Image: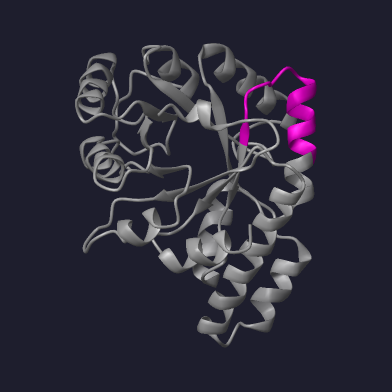
Amino acid sequence: MRIRDLYTPGKTVLSLEVFPPKDGALPLPELAALRPAFISVTVHASGDVDGTSAIAAEIQNRHGVPSMAHMTCVNSTRASVRQSLALVRERGIENILALRGDPVEGAVSGYRYAEELIRDIPKNFCVGAACYPEGHIESSDPESDIDFLKRKQDAGASFFISQLFFDNAVFLRFTERAKARGIHIPISAGVMPVLSRKQIEKMIFLCGASLPARVVRLLYRFQNSAEDLRKAGIELAAEQARELCETGADGVHIYTMNNPEVAQWIFSHC
């Protein structure tokens, strides 16, 4: 199942994201039971696709849910990309999320931007790409950032999945600007729940997302209770996802943090 075929006018596609665990098992049966449109699997910081594609194959072949393997420019050459794509295809995966990835010290890459990687992925794969409602943290301004999106679309991307954000108005303004600049492929909104103060501080530093007042109040109110903050953060993410569905977002992509409770709660509100 090609992910681009899941997007239809008037329907919000609900999807999930997981990452390869350092130890233990992924809660795939619990996540698959929610019947998401698809589940994406992140790649290790080193760029190794083997573990990612193995999990994606298990999701698809054992649990019957379409899956997507992430692939980054990190430590990638054109030869290694061909090898990785052959492995992914051998395992029955036809959906790829092509990303630049976070630079790794000492890593050598044959690609500078995700756009270049997208162009090297054969057309028999369905390729998605990332977008940034508040602009990429390295971007000089929001408009040039949308220019990069247009180049990804022209290179062959069939849909976008957004970086996390906490203010739906930011996402809606972004999609309006993108469409005005010629972006016509679907855009799924990435939603990540606030599970801990440390987690959010790390993500804010990495991606540059802003914190609206209601999130700041949440962090302040529950600063002395990690469990209450976690519960309130999941509820807030569920509310954010529900609002996005009501406004007709193309899709809502939930960063589950490998936690089935997160996905279950949010799905029950959409």
Identify the coloring. one colour
Q: Position of residue 61 (x, y in %)?
A: 25, 40
258, above or below 37, in the image? below
Residue 149 visible? The answer is yes
The total of numbered circles placed on residues is 0
Give the quarter of the image for residue 268: bottom right
- Between residue 3 and residue 231, name the one nearer to us: 3
Q: Which residues are magenta?
A: 173-187
Indicate yes or no whether the magenta region holds residue 155. Answer: no
- Quadrant position of the C terminus in the picture: bottom right
Residue 183 falls inside the magenta stretch: yes
Which image quadrant: the N terminus? top left
Depicted 224 relative to depicted 109: above or below? below
Is 7 on the left-hand or right-hand side of 92? right
- Name the outermost residue toward the bottom: 224
Does residue 4 appear left or right of residue 150 in this picture? Answer: left
> Image height check: is 37 above or below 191?
above
Does residue 5 appear left or right of residue 71 in this picture? right
Q: Position of residue 32 (x, y in %)?
A: 37, 53
Taking depth in this image into account, of 33 and 220 the one nearest to the observer is 33
Residue 144 shown left or right of residue 62 in the figure: right
Name the quadrant containing residue 178.
top right
Residue 193 appearing in the image: no
The residue at the point 21 percent across, 20 percent down is 86
**Image spot of residue 5 (x, y percent):** 51, 26
Viewer-closest of 75 and 17: 17
Q: Residue at x 69, y 63 (%)?
A: 239
Quarter of the view holding residue 82: top left
